[in-house]
Image: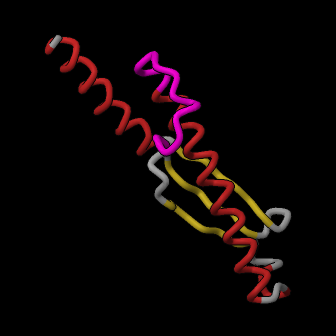
Amino acid sequence: MFGNMSKILGQLQGLQQQLKELTVEATAGDGLVRVIMNGQQQVLAVRFDPDRINATAPEELGQMLAEAYRQAQQASKTKARDEFSKATGLNIANLPGIF
């Protein structure tokens, strides 16, 4: 039993590193705002289209940023779940709150 546990812990440590290196990108406002996030749901970058940002109202820009963030977070969680399932052989897609 402990042999399996150490194997699983090793897999999970490797998975943590994979998730740190995995990236997703989401956009809003037809590409005006881009959010890049890793598989640990950490924001790596926020980018704006410099040719269009000055013509956008601050409130609208804030809404776009929030939307791009939500999309990136959902994509990151989905990828993290998929990677966890691949690494462990466990299907956790229907377990709420895991990722």
Residue 67 left/right relative to 69: right
- At x 79%, y 87%, the residue is 54
Residue 45 left/right relative to 52: left
Residue 2 left/right relative to 40: left
Residue 10 spot, x, y in % from top left: 25, 25
Q: Which residues are magenta?
A: 85-99
- At x 45%, y 16%, the residue is 89
- At x 57%, y 46%, the residue is 76
Quadrant of the image occupied by residue 5: top left
Residue 31 spot, x, y in % from top left: 80, 63
Question: Chief secondary structure of the magenta span?
Answer: loop
Queried whether the magenta region covers residue 96, the answer comes back as yes
Scheme by which the image is coloured:
secondary structure
- Could you tell me which quadrant the N terminus lies in? top left
Quadrant of the image occupied by residue 87: top left
Q: Nearer the viewer, residue 98 or 40?
A: 98
Q: Is 75 situated above or below 59?
A: above
Q: Nearer the viewer, residue 33 or 11?
A: 11
Marker count (numbered): 0
Residue 9 left/right relative to 92: left
- At x 35%, y 38%, the residue is 17
Residue 67 spot, x, y in % from top left: 72, 65
Queried whether the magenta region covers residue 81, the answer comes back as no
Q: Is 10 situated above or below 77?
A: above
Residue 71 spot, x, y in % from top left: 68, 55
